Image (cartoon, rainbow, N blue to C red):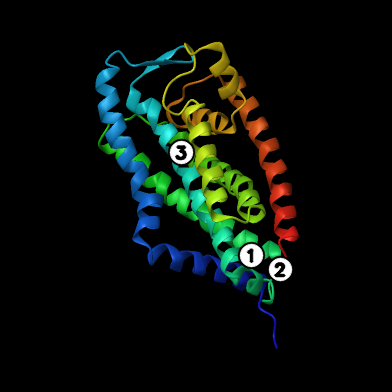
Amino acid sequence: MRAHSPFRNVAAVMYREYKIRITSFTWLFYDLALPAFYLLLFGIGLNTAFTGGVAVGGAVISYNAFFLAGVLSMAGFGIAINTSYGFFVDRDNGIFYEFLTYPMTRGEFLFGKILFSLCITTVQSAITVAIGVAVLRVQISLPLLPLLFLANAVCTAGWFFCLSIFALRIRRNDLYNTVINVAYFVLMFASSIFFPLDNSPAWLKILAGANPLTWHTDILRYLSVGTGEANTVLLQCAAYAVFAVAVFIGGVRALRASA
């Protein structure tokens, strides 16, 4: 029997992820439409509350402009959750072990899932940014727009590796959902997604400063509306790169241990 090429194997995994998404309106809504809904709902509501704007890194911007990066990072995290959850479901119903008998490597299987996540993240980012510009009048730094999409895709891949560790290691459905939901809310609210950290309590600044979701958000905020100090953002890029490599190694080990 002729072995399939790596490209066809990766494409097959991506096609399966695509079929799963389009057969579930809820997943498609969460991946693509919900972030824009959050941006409109919270953006319009809180923008009227912060009439004087939001001070970030010495600059004052509208809350809509501030919150756009938060929505993008939150959505990337959500896409990583949905994609990594597929590992848990596949292993729970036995399909994961059937995949391991197919003529494809574990790397091709993993890469197919990651590549699909990056495609979804890019589409979602484009939709959210377009609505932010057209409806909320957020002024985007156009020269940095390709870097914005690329950074969000790369950061989403990092979260996918991180969350895949839990999806592959945890056996019980109730425990898995509890861990993921607690992690989601703790990371989200102990970050710079919803509010600037300049005037926050010292303990919150420490927690948020060590939170990869803060790094993710601040990087996107710098690339979208240009707020923040370049040196700080570069340090956050380096920190996130270390985080991504660490969770990549952990995710590969979890994948091998689950075989």
Most foreground residue, 58 or 87: 87
> Residue, x 37% and y 42% (percent of image)?
35
Residue 109's label in the rendered image is 1
Is residue 251 positioned above or below 41 on the image?
below
Separation of residues labelled 3 and 2 (CA atoms): 31 Å
The C terminus is located in which quarter? bottom right
Q: Amino acid at mark 3?
A: Met
> Residue, x 62% and y 28% (percent of image)?
236
Is residue 170 positioned above or below 3 on the image?
above
Question: In the displayed structure, does residue 239 sit left or right of residue 126?
Answer: right
Most foreground residue, 107 or 219: 107
Q: Amino acid at mark 1?
A: Phe
**Number of residues whose C-alpha sits closer than 10 Å to that of mark 3, classed few (under 14), some (14–19) or many (20 or more):** many
The N terminus is located in which quarter? bottom right
Disc 3 is placed on an element classified as helix
Number of numbered callouts drawn: 3
Question: In the displayed structure, does residue 165 sit left or right of residue 227?
Answer: right
Give the residue number, with chain letter if any, for mark 2: 105
- State the image quarter where residue 194 is shown: top left
Mark before the other along the chain sequence, 1 or 3 = 3
- State the image quarter where residue 243 is shown: top right
**Number of residues whose C-alpha sits closer than 10 Å to that of mark 2, classed few (under 14), some (14–19) or many (20 or more):** some
**Number of residues whose C-alpha sits closer than 10 Å to that of mark 1, classed few (under 14), some (14–19) or many (20 or more):** many
Q: Position of residue 238 (x, y in %)?
A: 67, 31
